[in-house]
Image (cartoon, rainbow, N blue to C red):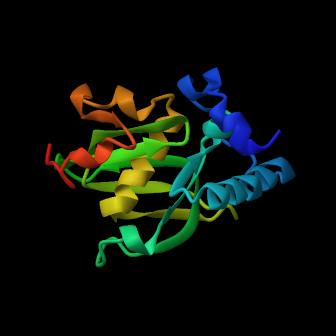
Amino acid sequence: MSLLKIARMGHPVLLQKAVPVEDIHAPEVQRLIDDMVETMDDIKGAGLAAPQVYRSLRLFLYRVPEARAAGGDDPPLETQVLINPILSPVDDEQILRQEGCLSIPGLRGWVPRFVRIRYAGYDRHGEYVEGIASGFRANVMQHEMDHLDGILYPMRMTDLSLLAFDEEATRFPAVVEA
């Protein structure tokens, strides 16, 4: 069964906290990452977390497509892997961002997200990485981190009147501040 089919099955692992990756170099972890990269490319997604493909592991992939990059602190990025991530807000500033999700197909909603976050974790080679992310990158990282904690984006929404089917989502303004 393909990873995409598993993700769309809506398995309960999506609502559970994922467990840390113990051996980043294990062949099954590296295969999972390869399969997730292929799946993310196939769906033209910006992020994918292991629980979305029925693996309760604390790892996710993300990228910033050129069309979504704001420049400066939010440049385009090729696919990145973050294993056993830790995210924390830089400050209290939040913004509402429109999100969709492979695990909840056909819907989009406005979710409050921190504008800037600190992140730390490991890349697929076991190298420690850390930094500050803003813009779309911060948004996608928070969305994928939620998957690792068993949270789906509608659970973060503060106004469910801003949840719509994809076809209707265009009626909301481009950016609404929290």
Asked whether 163 or 124 is in front, the reply is: 163
Quadrant containing the N terminus in the rendered view: top right
Name the residue at 22% across, 28% down. 161
In the picture as drawn, the residue positioned furthest to the front comes out as 167
Q: Is residue 26 left or right of residue 11?
A: right
Residue 37 placement (x, y as % from top left):
68, 59
Q: 127 or 72, which lies in front?
A: 72
Asked if residue 172 lies left or right of residue 154, the reply is left
Looking at the image, which residue is at 65% across and 37% down?
Answer: 7
- Which residue corresponds to the image point at 61% horizontal and 47% vertical from the top-left? 59
Q: Is residue 159 visible?
A: no
User: In the rendering, at what x and y percent does residue 34 appear?
Assistant: 75, 58
Horizontal side, residue 48 vs residue 65: left or right: right
**Depth order, front residue of 88/163:** 163
At a point 62% along the width and 36% down the height, the residue shown is 51
Q: Position of residue 158 (x, y in %)?
A: 23, 29
Please say if 22 is above or below 77: above
Please identify the residue farthest to the bottom as the structure is shown.
Answer: 72
Whether residue 150 can be seen here? yes
**Residue closer to the observer: 176 or 23:** 176
How many numbered marks are there? 0
Classify the position of the C terminus by image quarter: top left
Return the x and y of residue 93 as percentages of the image width and height.
Answer: 16, 49
**Residue at the extreme left:** 177
